Image (cartoon, grey):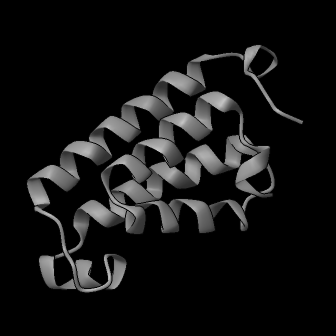
Amino acid sequence: MDTDELSSEAYEGIIVEAEKFNHDLTLPFGLLASSCENEKEYLIEAKKLITEIKALKTHELSDVFFESVPDKKDLHQVLDSILANILAVEKIPEGERHYDF
């Protein structure tokens, strides 16, 4: 799937939120969509990605942020916010989410 196939709620809660923090954080969430069949799978995998990123050591984060590593506390805060957004999206029945296609 592509990020264009995400509901508005998922796209804004994950992609837009990541972009507001740092474009480099948007990239792994965007790439993740290509390996998912549907939004449900994407949300599950996005939660796993958050856990993986939070577990990275500072020097390992340079691979995600191309050598310009943000403050870890700020990063964890935005990841927690994205996770909260994912949990909120999961509570919305799929038929009530808004899709552009």
Q: Quadrant of residue 92?
A: top right
The N terminus sits in image quarter: bottom right
Q: Position of residue 30 (x, y in %)?
A: 59, 61
Q: Position of residue 33 (x, y in %)?
A: 68, 59
Is 5 left, or right, of 23 in this rendering?
right
Is 101 left, or right, of 38 in this rendering?
right
Q: What residue sits 41% from the left and 63% below the top? A: 23
Q: Quadrant of residue 55?
A: bottom left
Q: What residue sits 51% from the left and 52% below the top? A: 46
Most foreground residue, 66 or 61: 66
Q: What residue sits 15% from the left and 85% below the top? A: 59
Is 22 left, or right, of 11 in this rendering?
left
Q: Quadrant of residue 22?
A: bottom left
Q: In the displayed structure, would residue 92 be above or below residue 83?
A: above
Most foreground residue, 39 or 68: 68
Most foreground residue, 37 or 72: 72
Q: In the displayed structure, would residue 14 be above or below residue 49?
A: above
- The residue at the far right in this view is 101
Q: Position of residue 82 (x, y in %)?
A: 39, 40
The C terminus sits in image quarter: top right
| Number of residue marks | 0
Q: What residue sits 60% from the left and 35% below the top? A: 10
